[in-house]
Amino acid sequence: MPQRLLLLLVLILASLSAQAFTLTDSKGKTHSLAQYKGKWVLVNFWATWCPPCLEEIPDLVALHENKKNKLVVLGVAMDYQDPKQVVQFADQMMVTYPVILGDHKMAAQIGAIQGLPTTYLYNPEGRMVAYNVGALSRETVERYINTKK
């Protein structure tokens, strides 16, 4: 089923330019869409209490670590009470990509959050090209990217 999710739920927005966004991660580093020009950018909205979110974390880590894809993963934690708990949780899950402590105002820079997890994918030119509600797999994302090269 995860392989079908992207194919079934992807909304192609190729004609729309991506909104610029600037996000600050839990370590104080700023991430903007402009600074990743030339790379794919996957922005994943998730929560610690969300089983599908937790299921996709190992695949997101693998995507982020695989440099041949030229892909950056940004994880935006939503719906939390204690920021320290989110950071500790991400450490326990061995998340290697930047974790942003998000809220709905910050998320509005990127797009609507219909449910968790929600993922937006930007191409190397900075254009939003895919949107997915539900868990993603590494294979699905890599297959999508490889069809666009």
Image (cartoon, rainbow, N blue to C red):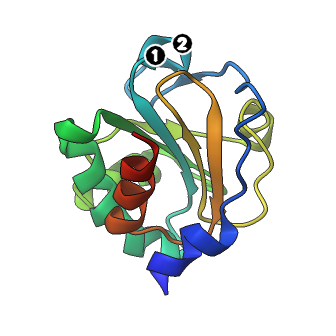
Residue for badge 2: 34
Q: To which quarter of the image does residue 141 belong?
A: bottom left
Looking at the rendered structure, the secondary structure element under dot 1 is loop
Judge by depth and name the residue closer to the eye, 92 or 63. Answer: 63
Looking at the rendered structure, the secondary structure element under dot 2 is helix
Farthest residue to the bottom: give it.
1
Q: Quadrant of the C terminus?
A: top left
Q: Amino acid at mark 2?
A: Ala
| Residue 51 seen in this snapshot | no
Residue for point 47% across, 67% down = 136
Residue 122: x percent and y percent?
56, 35
Disc number placed over residue 23 in the picture, else none:
none
- Side of 133 where 62 appears, left or right: left
Residue for point 19% across, 38% down = 68
How crowded is the residue under tag 1: few (<14 C-alpha within 10 Å), some, or many (20+)?
some
| Residue 60 seen in this snapshot | yes
Residue 43: x percent and y percent?
53, 42
Residue for point 43% across, 34% down = 40
Farthest residue to the top: give it.
35
Distance, label 2 to label 1, CA atoms, is: 6 Å
How crowded is the residue under tag 2: few (<14 C-alpha within 10 Å), some, or many (20+)?
few
Residue for point 46% across, 26% down = 124
Residue for badge 1: 37
- Side of 42 where 92 appears, left or right: left
- Side of 128 where 58 appears, left or right: left
Q: Marks 2 and 1: CB-CB under 8 Å?
A: yes
Residue 116: x percent and y percent?
64, 66
- Side of 132 where 73 appears, left or right: left
Judge by depth and name the residue closer to the eye, 149 or 42. Answer: 149
Residue 37: x percent and y percent?
46, 16
Q: Amino acid at mark 1?
A: Lys
